Amino acid sequence: MEDLSQISSQLTQKPSPLLLAGFENNEDCGVMLYNENDEYAMLSSVDFITPVVDDPYIYGQIAAANALSDIFAMGGIAKSALNLLMWDSTHFDVKVANAILKGGLDKITESGALLLGGHTIKDTEQKYGLSVNGVVHKNRIWRNNTAQENDVLVLTKPLGSGILTTAIKARMLHNQEEVIKSMAMLNLYAMQVAQNYEIHACTDITGFGLIGHALEMCRANITKKSHSPLLDSTQNSPYDKSILFYTTQIPLFENTKGLSKMGIVPGGSYENKNALSHQVQIQSQIDDDIFYYDAQTSGGLLFALPFAQAKAFVYDLRKAGITYANIVGEILPKREKAIILG
């Protein structure tokens, strides 16, 4: 991702009044209008992943839920999707590929979107995902860097899916049901509940972990050319606010701590920590902080909203079946570090 950011930082295009969020920003989706007078904007995103579980149908569900999540993170509705299948035909037969696509289609259908087609190529490593389009009212776009001081942060899914899926691959996790159910759950339902609240900012928690994506919330609300929090420097900080996380309130999947103590942690989580820890201050007594850097697959949404609405929001999320939803932090005026683990 760091290499990609360095490459794409040299790309430029002519300004357009139709472009509301492009690759120059750090948003979860690109956003554009078809015409300047349109009320609704088009959201566009793409994502694919390697297998995180053995069952191809469940893998397809998780990969699709992961790709669709960007649309929901911006407050949008998914409308269409295209399959992206990189098929390792040497090790997997046609039935496996069909099961992956069936899992993806079921999640696309559940989201209310339509599958329009896709593209398949042979590859030495299995990968699957979606290119997704959605719509959102141009005045109700949830951006990831527009949180306000004194906002409260609400997280909708536990952390630790990177650690647990690493354990699954190592045949070291016997009870997989909880993490599989969470990864396959669409963030659509959290987005629908949030439509009734004053959401100031939102992002989904995926490969950069909680801290990586939270850093986007700390950014000044101006266009940046850096695409990744991995490129930020302390000398030229892009942040104009800080986040205090309540570490005792952040939900973790069962067995996450025990597995991390055994060293069952994905390389991406360590890479996140190595790249981002200079922006983090630890103010609490914690045995380990790798969970907060853990590279998530199809993680939850992180919302910033007014303090007065936060408890009711969590109540409604849990009532809707999002049982791990919790208040996990708050937005502070800018401090020495962008992220504080309290």
Image (tube, helix red, strand yellow):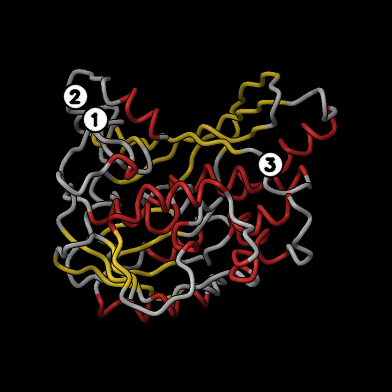
Quadrant position of residue 60:
top right
Reading the image, the residue beneath label 3 is 51
Reading the image, the residue beneath label 1 is 19
74 or 301: nearer the eye?
301
Crowding near pointer 1: few (<14 within 10 Å), some, many (20+)?
some
Q: Is residue 39 left or right of residue 250?
A: left
138 or 203: nearer the eye?
203
Between marks 3 and 1 in the image, the one whose residue lies nearer the viewer: 3
340 or 71: nearer the eye?
340
Q: Amino acid at mark 1?
A: Leu
Dot label at residue 16: 2
Q: Amino acid at mark 2?
A: Ser
Q: Is residue 17 above or below residue 216?
A: above
Quadrant position of residue 198:
bottom left
Q: Secondary structure at mark 3?
A: loop
Q: Residue 4: where, in percent of width, then height?
A: 39, 28
Q: Residue 77: where, in percent of width, then height?
A: 44, 47
Q: Residue 38: where, in percent of width, then height?
A: 25, 35
The residues bearing labels 3 and 1 have C-alpha atoms spaced at a distance of 34 Å
Seen at 50% across and 52% down, the residue is: 269
Q: Looking at the image, do the residues carrying marks 2 and 1 touch, with CB atoms under 8 Å apart?
A: yes
Seen at 61% across and 50% down, the residue is: 110
The residues bearing labels 2 and 1 have C-alpha atoms spaced at a distance of 5 Å
Q: Secondary structure at mark 2?
A: loop
First in sequence: mark 3 or mark 2? 2
